[in-house]
């Protein structure tokens, strides 16, 4: 496939006043045509000074090369001896010129060369040359990475800047994921074990695949603008229009304050504080009806909300829920292992974008909805607010407030706890966001652009982040008018014979199990406890092995336990499986995780033994 840089840029080779050749794209030189060698020395020295101030940097990825002259200066500088250095050059002809320079002993720097870039240089140390984005991503996955854009390449062509932005976003997202694993890894383990009994007695999300095919869905996020539109959502729901309401858990309190009863509520947060969002899970509608029925019996029927639960979410939140629970899949190896122990099929996973709002949006697609309206997806601190008015955590501040800890102080700390990142706003401005919200923004921007080609996707105006080419609506009425009530929604397909679409309301896809019933599986419970006992033996054996000197020669006997205990250590586990090598730090962390699993297995065994005991 043709490289976009090569397709959109005309490459020329210019001769500098000092005799070196310098690449030029569309008439713009990537390096100085006066003295490219001296300029390269200054650029490398500036980069070195930046790196000296960063203690954790181990690897340096340079996007754009500027041509052979920059490579030659880098090869005899101090940097390759201090860091693992790679150059990513997407233009094949320029890349080839650097390969030739690499295979040729670098010539002395031209002009006045005081040798400042050479001190400590070692031409025998290899500088990696990367020709495509995939190779650059693989290099950037390692810890301690710093990414640097070659100034001349960035000035010469915008696509170098695009590659730099992509890789910076990739590294940032990876760092957030790494931080999340480090922060929540043990919490996820505890939650997965604690939610086993809930998962056994709940339906799988697979039962909902395309269950609401062709219908419209309103997805409620918890952004500040939700408070501006929630009244209109309530009126829209009371009108009896057959439109699904999907809410993130953080939006539920605001929904309840305004009489909005979602059909589905999505929760994925592992933190115990998430309990507050679901603390009052009883519906506002009078008369709940049978909790084992579908979310809604008809266009005007009473709501019976369904909780969509990630098995690593807080078990405190799940215990507060009154009504049906449906379990999703989870990518952690432990989730798969516990499903195997319980004899359950692996549920489908909702797409992870780092936020519960991305899961809620993907749920709408999973249900088969062909028209989706996003409400409260500000992805910024609109009017300095963090959440919508009426959200559980905002109300909690009213009780925590005291003389030295005001709501205003708490609000300020939440807005500035993570580095500020301005995002393009709906009003042609820049809105206050942060590095965490930017990851969610990039996810939505990519997905919405792709999905809008086949689906009817829109947003209610929020004064927050802007999504180019996605329609903005000022009101619920404006959105629904363009759907043309009474006609098929855009993008609907004729249903399969096996799954007919309903004439009105929601299809009946069968009852939802909401509790463990011993009379249905007495032998199954005994089998699960037996499997747990077997896994306990494996973890005890692994714990004993880690205390002795023979781990590397006998670890394969406990491969399953190592895989399940490897939350946050997947790369180290993979290296162990391929090379058999392991560091002392890995063994120490694995020993800690092993003891954690032993404790949680004991607690799970006790909980299961008490379920419907005679």
Image (cartoon, rainbow, N blue to C red):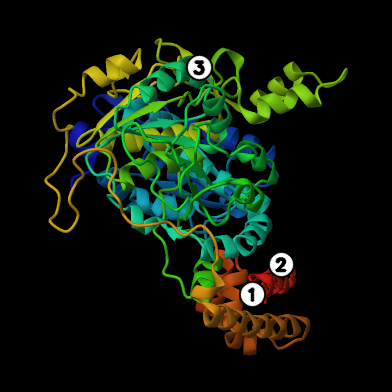
Is any part of residue 372 visible from this angle? yes
* Nearest to the observer: residue 559 or residue 278: 278
Other residues around mark 2 within 10 Å, as few (<14) / some (14–19) / many (≥20) = some
**How far apart are the alpha carbons under marks 3 and 2?**
41 Å
Question: What kind of element bears circle 2?
Answer: helix
The percent position of residue 136, horizontal first and vertical second, equals 41, 50
Where's residue 79, x and y in %? 58, 47
- Disc 2 target residue: 589
Mark 3 vs 2: CB contact within 8 A: no
The residue lying at 50 percent from left, 24 percent from top is: 259
578 vs 569, left or right, is left
Q: Earlier in the sequence, mark 1 or mark 3?
A: 3
- The residue singled out by tag 3 in the image is 431
| Image coordinates for residue 77, horizontal then vertical, percent | 56, 46
Please tell me which residue lies in front, 189 or 545: 189
* Tag 1 residue: 582
Earlier in the chain: of badge 3 and badge 2, it is 3
Foreground residue among 243 and 589: 243
Q: Marks 1/2: CA distance?
A: 11 Å
Instruction: Residue 382: give its label.
Output: none
Q: Rate crowding at label 3 as few (under 14), some (14 to 19) or many (20 or more) other CA atoms within 10 Å.
A: many
Question: In this view of the protein, which residue sits in the foreground, 573 or 503?
Answer: 503
Task: Determine the secondary structure under disc 1.
Answer: loop
């Amino acid at each position: 496939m043709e490289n976009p840089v090569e397709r959109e840029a005309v490459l020329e080779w210019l001769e500098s006043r000092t005799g070196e050749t310098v690449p030029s794209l569309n008439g713009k030189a990537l390096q100085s045509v006066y003295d490219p060698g001296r300029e390269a020395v200054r650029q490398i020295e500036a980069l070195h000074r930046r790196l000296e101030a960063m203690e954790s940097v181990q690897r340096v990825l340079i996007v754009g090369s500027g041509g052979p002259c920059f490579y030659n200066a880098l090869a005899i500088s101090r940097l390759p001896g201090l860091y693992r250095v790679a150059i990513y050059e997407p233009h094949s002809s320029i890349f080839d010129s650097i390969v030739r320079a690499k295979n040729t002993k670098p010539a002395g720097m031209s002009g006045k060369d005081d040798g400042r870039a050479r001190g400590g240089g070692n031409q025998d140390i290899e500088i990696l040359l990367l020709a495509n984005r995939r190779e650059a991503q693989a290099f950037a996955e390692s810890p301690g990475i710093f990414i640097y854009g070659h100034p001349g390449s960035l000035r010469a062509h915008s696509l170098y800047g695009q590659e730099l932005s992509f890789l910076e976003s990739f590294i940032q997202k990876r760092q957030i994921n790494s931080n999340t694993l480090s922060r929540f890894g043990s919490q996820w383990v505890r939650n997965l074990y604690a939610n086993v009994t809930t998962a056994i007695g709940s339906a799988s999300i697979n039962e909902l695949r395309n269950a609401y095919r062709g219908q419209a869905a309103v997805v409620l996020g918890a952004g500040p603008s939700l408070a501006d539109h929630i009244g209109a959502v309530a009126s829209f729901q009371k009108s009896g229009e057959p439109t699904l309401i999907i809410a993130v858990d953080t939006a539920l309190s605001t929904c309840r304050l305004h009489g909005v009863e979602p059909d589905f509520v999505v929760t994925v947060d592992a933190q115990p504080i998430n309990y507050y969002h679901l603390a009052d899970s009883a519906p506002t509608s009078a008369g709940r009806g049978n909790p084992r029925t579908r979310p809604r019996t008809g266009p005007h029927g009473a709501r019976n909300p369904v909780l969509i639960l990630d098995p690593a979410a807080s078990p405190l939140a799940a215990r507060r829920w009154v009504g049906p629970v449906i379990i999703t899949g989870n990518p952690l190896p432990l989730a798969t292992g516990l499903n195997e122990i319980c004899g359950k099929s692996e549920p489908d996973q909702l797409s992870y974008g780092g936020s519960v709002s991305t899961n809620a949006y993907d749920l709408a697609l999973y249900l088969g909805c062909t028209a989706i309206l996003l409400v409260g997806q500000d992805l910024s601190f609109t009017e300095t607010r963090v959440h919508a008015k009426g959200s559980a955590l905002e109300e909690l501040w009213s009780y925590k407030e005291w003389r030295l800890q005001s709501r205003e102080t708490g609000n300020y700390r939440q807005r500035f706890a993570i580095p500020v990142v301005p995002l393009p706003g709906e009003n042609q401005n820049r809105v206050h966001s942060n590095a965490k919200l930017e990851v969610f923004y990039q996810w939505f921007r990519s997905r919405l652009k792709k999905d809008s080609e086949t689906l009817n996707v829109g947003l209610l105006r929020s004064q927050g982040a802007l999504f180019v080419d996605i329609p903005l609506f000022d009101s619920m009425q404006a959105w629904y008018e363009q759907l043309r009530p009474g006609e098929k929604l855009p993008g609907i397909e004729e249903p399969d014979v096996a799954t007919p679409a309903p004439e009105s309301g929601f299809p009946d896809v069968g009852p939802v199990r909401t509790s463990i019933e011993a009379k249905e599986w007495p032998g199954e419970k005994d089998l699960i406890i037996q499997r747990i006992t077997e896994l306990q033996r494996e973890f005890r054996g692994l714990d004993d092995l880690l205390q002795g000197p023979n781990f590397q020669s006998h670890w394969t006997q406990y491969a399953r336990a190592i895989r399940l205990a490897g939350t946050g250590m997947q790369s180290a586990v993979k290296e162990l499986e391929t090379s058999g090598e392991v560091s002392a730090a890995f063994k120490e962390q694995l020993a800690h995780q092993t003891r954690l699993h032993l404790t949680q297995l004991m607690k799970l065994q006790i909980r299961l033994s008490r379920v419907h005991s005679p």
